[in-house]
Image (tube, rainbow, N blue to C red):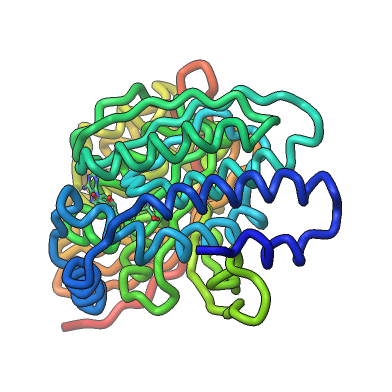
């Protein structure tokens, strides 16, 4: 594949041109050694054409996947990370790394932005396919000399994402490139795991095809976890590395979610809605401090202390039947959070719909909520 010379035409600054040649050479050599088969590539196309992508044996189809999709996924990653890269991304976790296209795009962008400094980056590659992991590791090892601003360490983890056992609050960036669409039934668990491993201020970046119905599920999972999320479509040059007339503009979808600086407040809010949903008053002690203030109505005296909150929940929340609760949006500033929610339930033979907003303040030492103020409106409809 000779895209090196045409890619050159599109680079203006000499420094960028030098880096690009060498990065391009790495991708060129990498792909030149890949041996996909017609049968394998046909099989993958058929799998991805289905809404419910079946489980793919990537140990068998790793090279077919790289031959078909590596450049495309690399280009998508380039487009996304040129917008979304967080500067503090020193420990990068790539869940379902495949042949490494997404993380390669991420590292190229990090190198481009480093501007003369040397950054140590630790990359953890996770995949259930050993063949994919080998390809990704080979690629990153070859990329090292082409990314002079980065000192890259690579660790491979041959595991199902669901069984990954990494310490909490350790990753600065978590990448999920075209992997959730293959994990629809466990998507919430995977997002939960990614959020647990991500440290405060970390970014979660999810890439999927623009019109994939998976986006609804992704957005529900992120918002019910209390994560502030931006979901966008972005144009990318389908054959950017091929350059020239062959460049094709297409769109990819992505979502980036930022873990708040006070991550414990986000966890408390997610647990508050989980406690409401499951009507578990025993969870309240993990959410509120012993002396927490709970102002349910602005013109009433607030509840004072955990016991009062538990009693209130036993009287007002536990009797709710057919409960559906949604945390729709949340945002954070310092030790405060704002969350918008909606709920439906049946109470005393009446259908009740409530929408509201709550404001919480967190206690950093106790890692719990010290004050909650709630504002809501209710509509009722007798059965
Ligand atoms: C479509 S490829 C995407 C690869 C790469 N992220 C990219 O964007 O090009 C999906 C990869 O995720 C891996 N994978 C899918 N589900 C997984 C799971 N539950 N646990 C671990 N790996 C998984 C597959 O083995 C495959 O290598």
Identified at 43% across, 26% down, the residue is 154
Q: Quadrant of the C terminus?
A: bottom left
**What x and y, as percent, mark residue 261?**
59, 33
Q: In the rendered view, would you say 122 is above or below 174?
A: above
Furthest toward the right, the residue is: 13
Question: Is 112 in front, or is 168?
Answer: 112
Q: Is residue 276 visible?
A: yes
**What x and y, as percent, mark residue 265?**
48, 35
Identified at 25% across, 79% down, the residue is 49
Q: In the rendered view, would you say 153 is above or below 31?
A: above
In this rendering, the count of numbered labels is 0
Question: Is 199 in front, or is 118?
Answer: 118
Q: In the rendered view, would you say 151 is above or below 302?
A: above
Q: Is residue 264 visible?
A: no
**Left or right of 183: which side holds 358?**
right
**What x and y, as percent, mark residue 91?**
51, 29
Question: Is 265 in front, or is 13?
Answer: 13
**Left or right of 265: which side holds 163?**
left
Q: In the rendered view, would you say 365 is above or below 21?
A: above
**What x and y, as percent, mark residue 241?**
59, 63
Identified at 21% across, 38% down, the residue is 130
Please tell me in which quadrant of the rendered image residue 145 appears. Answer: top right
């Amino acid at each position: 594949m000779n895209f090196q010379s045409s890619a050159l035409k599109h680079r203006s600054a000499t420094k960028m041109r030098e880096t690009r040649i060498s990065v391009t050479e790495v991708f060129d050599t990498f792909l030149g050694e890949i041996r996909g088969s017609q049968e394998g590539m046909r099989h993958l196309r058929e799998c991805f054409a289905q809404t419910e992508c079946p489980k793919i044996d990537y140990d068998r189809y790793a090279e077919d996947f790289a031959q078909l999709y590596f450049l495309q996924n690399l280009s998508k990653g380039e487009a996304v990370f040129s917008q979304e890269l967080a500067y503090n991304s020193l420990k990068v976790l790539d869940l379902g790394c495949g042949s490494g296209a997404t993380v390669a795009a991420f590292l190229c962008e990090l190198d481009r932005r480093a501007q003369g400094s040397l950054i140590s980056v630790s990359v953890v590659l996770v995949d259930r396919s050993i063949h994919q992991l080998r390809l990704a590791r080979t690629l990153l090892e070859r990329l090292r000399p082409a990314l002079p601003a980065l000192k890259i360490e690579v660790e491979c983890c041959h595991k199902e994402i669901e069984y990954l056992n990494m310490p909490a609050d350790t990753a600065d960036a978590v990448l999920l490139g075209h992997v959730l669409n293959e994990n629809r039934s466990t998507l919430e668990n995977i997002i939960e795991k990614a959020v647990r491993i991500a440290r405060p201020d970390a970014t979660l970046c999810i890439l999927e095809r623009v019109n994939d119905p998976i986006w609804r599920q992704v957005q529900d999972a992120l918002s019910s976890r209390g994560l502030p999320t931006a979901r966008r479509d972005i144009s990318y040059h389908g054959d950017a590395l091929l350059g020239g007339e062959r460049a094709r503009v297409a769109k990819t979808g992505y979502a980036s979610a930022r873990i708040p600086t006070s991550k414990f407040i986000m966890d408390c809010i997610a647990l508050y809605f989980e406690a409401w949903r499951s009507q578990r008053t025993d969870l309240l002690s993990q959410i509120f401090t012993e002396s927490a203030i709970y102002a349910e109505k602005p013109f009433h005296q607030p509840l004072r202390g955990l016991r009062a909150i538990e009693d209130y929940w036993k009287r007002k929340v536990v009797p709710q039947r057919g409960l559906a609760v949604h945390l729709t949006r949340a945002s954070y500033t310092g030790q405060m959070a704002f969350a918008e929610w909606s709920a439906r339930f049946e109470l005393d033979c009446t259908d009740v719909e409530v929408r509201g907003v709550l404001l919480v303040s967190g206690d950093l030492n106790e890692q719990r909520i010290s004050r909650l103020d709630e504002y809501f409106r209710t509509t009722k409809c007798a059965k």
